[in-house]
Every structure is written in C-alpha cells, then in structure tokens.
Image (spheres, rainbow, N blue to C red):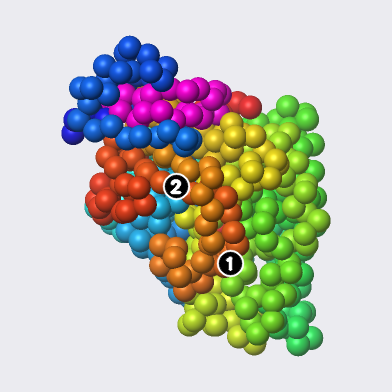
Amino acid sequence: MGTTVIRGGLVITAADETNADILIEGGRVTALAAHDSDVARAWAESADRVLDASGRYVIPGGVDAHTHMEMPFGGTFAVDTFETGTRAAAWGGTTTIVDFAVQTVGESLRAGLDAWHAKADGNCAVDYAFHMILSDVNEDTLKEMDGLVDEGVTSFKLFMAYPGVFYSDDGKILRAMQRAAGNGGLVMMHAENGIAIDVLVEQALAAGRTDPRYHGEVRHALLEAEATHRAIQLARVAGAPLYVVHVSATEAVAELAQARDLGLPVFGETCPQYLFLSTDNLAEPDFEGAKYVCSTPLRPKEHQAHLWRALRTNDLQVVSTDHCPFCFKGQKEMGLGDFSKIPNGLPGVENRMDLLHQAVVDGRISRRRWIEIACATPARMFGLYPRKGTIAPGADADIVIYDPDATQVMSAETHHMNVDYSAYEGRTVTGRVQTVLSRGEVVIDDRTYTGRAGHGRFVARETCRYLG
Ligand code: URP
Ligand code: ZN
Ligand code: ZN
Ligand code: ZN
C-alpha cells in the first residue's frame, strides 16, 4: 500500500473544523497540513494517489456501536450477514461496527464469542468488534468476563426484558455489574421491565388487540423509565458505570439526566428510528406497521424533541443504529394476527450518518456534534479511540469524503442492506457519502464499491475511555 493524499476538503472532527490536506501512509493518518502549503503540495506531488475533496467534508468513518448481523431472534435470523451488513455500512460511511456476540442459556461466553468470530472473520468489508450478550449469569460466566475483557471484548449487554430468552433478574444484573466494576468492563443495559410488559402483552392479545401498533402500547414508556431507574441504582450499588442502549422515552431520558446531574458515570444511546420515526409509523395500515417493530418501541412524536435536546445537552452521548433487519415478506409477517410474534428490529446501518447529517442541515446539531455522537464518542466509550473516531496522526485512515450538498432519496430500491424494505422509504435527505477509506484502502470510490469481504479486521478494544 502506497501513500494517499486527500486534498482540498474541510476536515471535521469532534474537536475542530480545518481546511487541511491529509497524508496517509501504511493505512494510517501520518500528518495534516494546510491547503496549498508547501508541505501539502509536496505530498501531492509524490503521493501514489490523490483524492480530491474540494467542496466536500472529510470526516472520520462512522463508528456504529450497536449492530446485530445474523442475529438469531424471534424464531428467525437478522438477514444481513457480516458480509452484506458491513458492505452496507461502508456505503453509508460507517467504517467500524461493534456487533453483539450472543451467549445462549446453558452455554459459555467462549462458545458464544467463538460462534460470532466464525460468522464474521474473513467476511467483513470494514473493521468490527464485539460486545458480549450475557444471557446466563452464573459463577462460571462471571469469571469468563475477565478473560473477555483481556481479549478486547470489553462490554457486556444485559436484558431486563425478554423473560425466558435474554432476561436477567436484578440479582444477576447486580453480580455482573460488580464483576464489571472490578475488571473494567462496561455494562450495557436493555432497560425495559419485561415481566410487566409480558402481562400487558397477554392482556392485549386476549382483548383482540393484535395489530403492530399495540407493540408500542404494551411496551409502555414508564416501563422503560422504571427499568432505567432500577439499572442506574443497581450500577450505583455495584460501583460500576452504565450505558443504556436504545433510549426512546422522554421519561427514561429524565432518569439518565437526573443520574448525570448527581455526577454518576451513566451514559445513554439513542437511535435514528427514535429521532425520525414514531408511533404513526407503527400504526400504518395493512400490517405495514410491522416494519417499525423494535424494542424499545417507537414513541409518539412528542418524544423526539426531548431526545434531540438530550443529544445537545450530552444527557445522551451516542447515536447507534441497533441495526437488526428482518424482511417484511416472510419474517415480519410471522406476526400477522399477533404483534408479539413480529421479530423485533429495524434496518439502518447504512442510513445513520446521512440522517444525522440531515439534523445538521436542519440546525438541530452542529457539524462537530454530528461527528462526536456518531464517531468520536462511540469510539471513546468502547475503547477504540483514537485509533477510530477521529482524524489525527496515528489514527487508522478510516475516512469519508462526504458531499454535503448532494441530495438522495432513501429507498429499498437503492440501499445495500439485504432487506426488502427501508424504514425511511421515500425520505429525501441532503448529504451523501462519496468516497470511503478503511485503513487507507478505498472501499467506496466515488460511489462505486471497491472493497472486499475479508478486508475488515477484528479490533480488540480497550476498556471505556469516556468520562464526559
Ligand atoms: O428490537 C430490537 N432492538 N432488536 C434487537 C435486539 C435488541 O434488543 O437490541
Ligand atoms: Zn477472530
Ligand atoms: Zn436491546
Ligand atoms: Zn440491539
């Protein structure tokens, strides 16, 4: 691999916006220099490749800290493989994903992690890392957590929802948090009171309320808030930091804000679907609402303003996708006549950077905040920074040349995710990925895919480096 120069663009990181050219050698950024400076001119003359970024943004590749490729769930599998899902990620300007390896009940963490390596290794277009889902907290698996932290799997998701599948009771959660407090792991929480939700599901179905929109009603905002509150108190007792995934309800954001006001190391993520979609989508007729079934569920539109506000005030720090795609035909349809059988999850790994750029265009967040919530903070939170999430000497050359003026219409016809619908069908957004580099290799070249399965490498992560 020779040297590459990216010339003429506006380089945006979470910290700065600078008119700089970038020198890339050996897959890493080695230096930045002002446009038209003598040093930058000399780079361009001797480089093996010069990429013109005039009139474009040059941003760090996106870090999507929440994906589920090939995830077994709800009696079926998420349809993006690591190959198709990471290719779609690249198309959307995301160059690192952190996917969830699953421990099934009765199995070791090792077996679950090995199974996820077998799915991913040699198949990814961009770099990837793993969190571990703990479904069976016991003496053995608690000990195994330490070993996983040592090999770069430094975060553990627990579920207060899905009794009988992933659910852990408060005692198990407390034990896992205590272990994480000792080994530096970060506990990620699916915060919904699944025991109470299952009662409401049963009652709704018995009353004949079977349509997708009832998925949103039974998974009540207060049951998200209650679980969030409980998770925070358990983490306090354990002396562990806490990261709450897919936060959707105003009332849950309030719990996080209150904890942060006390100075607690409590963090939260939301997802584009909660910022841009609502229960209006869940109520779409002819079972179309099933396309929008995920947990936590979409909320009434009024919640969106609170999520945007929390992203501005840093009560929420990260936007990830929770990409977990199921086709409408054959998979979402498993829940015809019973919303509780609709596999939970939305596609979105390709759409996140663009949707958040639209929020920049709309004046909801600044350009630097866009990069912070989509690249830098997820990298810091999950021990990938400064290798990922920024453009600086020494960082991996995971870089996107982004056209802020191009418009595009999101559609299943044109997206690259392996799923038969788009949650954003027909939505016009301003901004589009033009060229993408992963460790210095061009994987999207002026909107042509030039990457390959197997380029992406497993990244062993450090422990959480985020203090904000
Ligand atoms: O509905 C969702 N979110 N599916 C993926 C699994 C999870 O809980 O994150
Ligand atoms: Zn591996
Ligand atoms: Zn979850
Ligand atoms: Zn998820």
- Relative height, residue 67 to residue 22 (above, below): below
Residue under pointer 2: 433
Residue drawn at x 62%, y 69% as measured from the top left: 293
Q: Quadrant of the C terminus?
A: top right
Spot occupied by residue 84 in the image (x, y as percentages of width and height): 35, 61
Q: Secondary structure at mark 2?
A: strand
* 222 sits left or right of 165 in the view: right
- The amino acid type of the residue labelled 2 equals Val
- Give the residue furthest to the top: 38
Say what secondary structure mark 1 lies in. Answer: loop
- At a point 79% along the width and 43% down the height, the residue shown is 254
Q: Nearer the viewer, residue 269 or 242?
A: 269
Residue 192 percent across, percent down from the top left: 69, 57
Q: Which residue is mark 1?
A: 426
Query: How packed is label 1: few (under 14 Cα within 10 Å), some, or many (20 or more)?
Result: few
Which residue: 31% across, 54% down? 449
- Report the span colored magenta: 5-25
Q: Amino acid at mark 1?
A: Gly
Q: CA distance from mark 2 to mark 1?
A: 18 Å
